[in-house]
Image (spheres, rainbow, N blue to C red):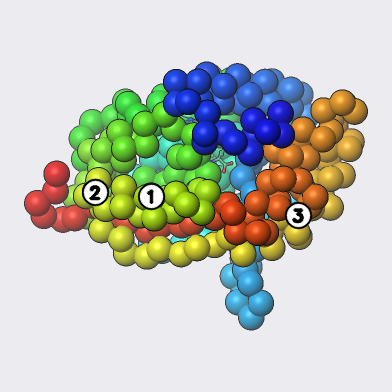
Amino acid sequence: MRIIILNFVHIPRIFRKPLWRMWHNWLIAWERKNVVMRFMNYGYAPLEGKTEMFPLSTDDEPERFCTQLYHYAVSHIELKDKDILEVGSGRGGGASYISRYLLPRSYVALDLSVKGIEFCNDFYSSPNLRFVRGEAENLPFDDQHFDVVVNVESSRVYADIERFFREVFRVLKPGGAFLLTDMRPRHQVEHLHRQVQEAGFLVQKYENITNNVVKALDLDDKRKKHLIRKRVPGPLIKMFGEFAGLRGSGRYASFASGAMQYVSYFLLKPLENAK
Ligand SMILES: C[S@@+](CC[C@H](N)C(=O)[O-])C[C@H]1O[C@@H](n2cnc3c(N)ncnc32)[C@H](O)[C@@H]1O
């Protein structure tokens, strides 16, 4: 399992989607009875000297670092009264945070996982938020429909990322923003940079946030270890530790050594001559 998680991007494309769907459906069904996990990302922590902390309710505080990844990813623009699409919304924690705290007019959160969408529709109830099942490479929306598209820690497993970028470009209004945050093996970072530009987006801001992710993994390690020990059956503890990026796992080591990089983009669809 450790080998599969660490080498997921090297698995042939046609196997990636069914594998990912199986794993997430299982994870969601397993955790459904007593929800302690509303996010499935590695988190973000400000580095020394920066004060990017923001207030969260008592209920939201335990998953602060995962929330902070979203907070950072969307921090480049005002979201109030905007129409937003999130692709790869997982267990809906980021969608719920943005819809309640940053007050967009509407927030549509889309994910491949049927069980994930069922869970989110049962669990959350913000009036401006809805969850729909769909595929990143075939977005079920009209052209030029959204002001903003958000995508957090999801794109790296898509079978056809260039098709996903074309779809994002299509559903965004001219001048709309694409906020993309994800990890890539170090040798693929340049390629991603080319792909977003070839898709027609203008790079407004690019940041390598690997050190912020490592810091979040450090600061969140105790909480995650405790949860895994308490909730996961013995034989699966190691696998979950790997998936969660606990200190000592291969995933943690790959971030700490820089072999895996975490990058974040603020991209714009041009106002004129849009594709
Ligand atoms: C690591 S989780 C991250 C979830 C969420 N963004 C977060 O940060 O908590 C990746 C999510 O992407 C979804 N996903 C994977 N491939 C997808 C696809 N082709 N279309 C839509 N969603 C997809 C998975 O079902 C999963 O929920």
Mark with earlier residue (3, 2): 2
* Circle 1/circle 3 CB separation < 8 Å: no
Above or below: residue 239 compared with residue 148: above
Q: Is mark 2 within 8 Å of ligand 1?
A: no
Q: Quadrant of residue 144?
A: top left
The x, y position of residue 102, in whole percent, is: 48, 55
On residue 198, the disc is 2
Dot 3 lies on which element? helix
**What numbered label is drawn on residue 192?**
1
Q: Residues within 10 Å of mark 1 (few under 14, many from 20)?
A: some
Q: CA distance from mark 1 to mark 2?
A: 10 Å
Residue 103 shown left or right of residue 42 in the figure: left
Q: CA distance from mark 3 to mark 2?
A: 37 Å
Labels 1, 3: front one:
1
Q: Residue at x 44, y 32 (%)?
A: 158
Along the line of sight, the residue nearer the viewer: 105 or 213: 213
Secondary structure of residue under mark 1: helix
| Residue found 50% across the figure and 48% down from its top | 184
Residue highlighted by disc 3: 220
Q: Label 2 neighbourhood size at 10 Å, few (<14), some (14-19), many (20+)?
A: few
Asked if residue 130 lies left or right of residue 172, the reply is right
On the rendered image, what quadrant is the N terminus found in? top right
Residue at far bottom of view = 49
The residue type indicated by label 1 comes to Leu
